[in-house]
Image (cartoon, rainbow, N blue to C red):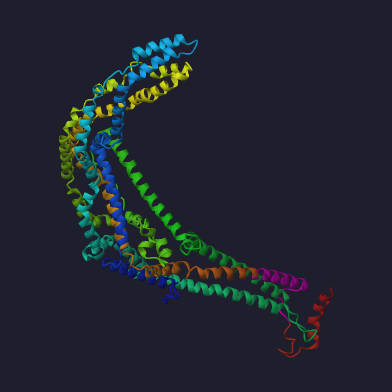
Amino acid sequence: MVNPDSRLGTFSKLNESLADTEKALDDMYKMAVNTSSVDLSTQKNRFLSIVDGNLKEFQKEFVRKSHADLVLTPIAELQSTVRSFDVNSEAVAFFRQFYSDLSKLIQELPTIRQNLMDTLDTDCPWGNHVECTQLLHLAQSNLKTRYTMEQFQSDELKTLVEQIQRHLNEVENLNEFNKTLNSLASVIKATIQDDLDRAWTDLAQSPATREKLARSFEDYLQHIYTYLRQARQRLTMDGDQNARNVFIRFVEFRFYGGVALLCIPVLIFLLIYLGLCFGTCGHRPYEEAGVCNRGVGANLLLAGVGFIFLFSTVLMLICTILFVLGGPIQTEVCRYLTGQVPDGPRKLDDYLHHTLQYMIDKIRREDRIRQQEEELRRAKYGDSTIVSHSEMSPHLEVVLNISRARLLDAVLTRCANEPFVDAISGGQIVWPVLHEPIQSILENLITAYKDTNLVAPLDQTVQICVSALERTNFLDSVNFTQAINQADLSVTQIDDLEGFVSSLRKLNAEALTPHIDELVQKVVRLDKARAQARHLYTKLDSIPGQRRQLRLQLSEFSRKLAESVQLTMDVGLKNLRPLLEHELQLAVIATWRDIPCQPLRSAVKGGVDAVCVMPLMPLNAFWAGLGLTLWLFIPLIIFAVKLAGLYRKTEKYSSDYEEPDYISYRGFYMRPSNESQGVSQKPRNKLRKH
């Protein structure tokens, strides 16, 4: 624990690890200030794509805010109507065919009627004279054209088509409005492009900008340095001499206590040895020599058993204390830090972060409850005293912000193969401390964005559209009401022309077949085309209304243009600013990808080993030695107790502490006289015979 060699001593290793950690952080800070060699092209392309996407959303938002769709809709309708009556269009071709068929029908219908009447008069089938007579009178009176070519306004249509052909480009110029709306994103992009390029250049190459960015972490680093230095002072005990003296006395006490503890097993083995020596004397050289004192041997063995229990109790007490101290560290901390638990560092990070968050939320909740109680009290008693709110410790907020980075997982796990910024949440984490220095870079972009003039191009486009409408004012005179009304009526004066043809078919007269086919091909077909003609006339007649609607919407759009632009830019800026800030922060983080993480990982790994390996791993050997010792003590206790019982059984009536007759042993003294020997030995021999 206190060995000055960092390879052996826990405190020395931990102190060295803290110093290396501080040095690694300082080196990383210096590298963050220096010019970066990282290529930011990927980040720049991603940033520009996000800007482009947001600007497209700005265009859509402007269309919604300015109600530009109310302008786009009549433009599209007017253009569609005008294009559909181009000289080469299907509608004009239909009218040509319709007018041609109508002209021919006007000329040929009297002949068709006369031939039909003659056939009905002469070739009427037998039994159908009544029907033939009715059809004959109907054809004679009503099989006539209802209107003339002038009633379909063919000349007006021809003139309108020619005018549309001449002014079609003017109508196409209305597309400028849609083009301008779709170019708003490119206008803004062109305005802020220089500031975008300058921002990316500053991020990677400007020493002043990079120093400002790096200094945003200075407060956090100072807090970390303070904690590291305080920990080193506690380990070295430089500032507290009393604590140092107490610790030294504790170390001395532990040393001498360990020596005393080691003396107990020596005493145990000595007692067992003496017990064996007193109880197993071997063959006596003389029959009358003093007997072995097995009672003393039994007492020594039992004393050894007692010391075994004492030693085991002391060992288990020490193990309990060590387990209470080291067990939670090993179970709740070291298992996660050393990776014994899968994804252990990240789980420990999450636990620390949630714990700190819970503490902060609890402090805020208690402060809020206290504030509400004070407000109720003041409202009840009319006290106007200002309530002072308890301030949360700023250090706790700093630690919470640091815990968000998941540093343990980043340093202990991912730093092995990744740079530091990639190790921390894949380089995608956004640090709140970067908010302020990013603002200086972001402010130029925001200023350029606000200075973009969108009113001028939009107002110019409105004027172009109004001028184009002025040059197509002939469209206001379009009026095909007469043709529409005529198209509502049948071509002939027979309203149900198809019913008339059906009645002719029911006569089953072969002579009528050519006349029926002629009616179908020329009259019925033209009558069916009447619906399409009416639809096209109605479409033409809607042009003046579409043009007036477009003029009205353009005027309304121009009146609210400045307000709509400002409102949309405010909304767009509100949405764009967080994206710009987020991406710039990611770009700043990306410029630090050339900062290595391995030195920091080695330093922190050394600290983890100093806490979790050097002091705790020997304890594992201690647990094994303790278990082996206790297992060996069990047969030793059984052996000693059994042997002591055997000693007692063989020396039932002898006094345990009777002094042995060593005087008669010639190895010590001369042999006494026979009288005294006889007197002294006979009682013992007699006792043995019993």
On the question of residue 200 being in view, the answer is yes
Is residue 342 or residue 631 the one in the foreground? Answer: 342
| Extreme residue in the right direction | 689
Q: Is residue 289 left or right of residue 132?
A: right
**The quarter of the displayed image where residue 642 is located:** bottom right
Q: Is residue 662 magenta?
A: no
Question: Which quarter of the rendered picture does the N terminus lie within?
Answer: bottom left
**The quarter of the displayed image where residue 470 is located:** top left
On the question of residue 490 being in view, the answer is no
Q: Please state the horizontal and vertical placement of residue 320, each as a whole percent of the image.
A: 54, 63
In the image, what residue occupies the spot 26% across and 45% down? 58
Is residue 509 or residue 83 the one in the foreground? Answer: 509
Q: Image height check: is 652 above or below 62? A: below
In the image, what residue occupies the spot 18% across and 45% down? 454
Question: Which quarter of the rendered picture does the C terminus lie within?
Answer: bottom right
For the record, the magenta segment spans 632-660
Magenta segment's dominant SS is helix
Is residue 683 or residue 436 the one in the foreground? Answer: 436
Q: Please state the horizontal and vertical placement of residue 115, each as a whole percent of the image.
A: 38, 18
Is residue 521 or residue 433 the one in the foreground? Answer: 521
Q: Please state the horizontal and vertical placement of residue 432, each as a whole percent of the image.
A: 30, 54
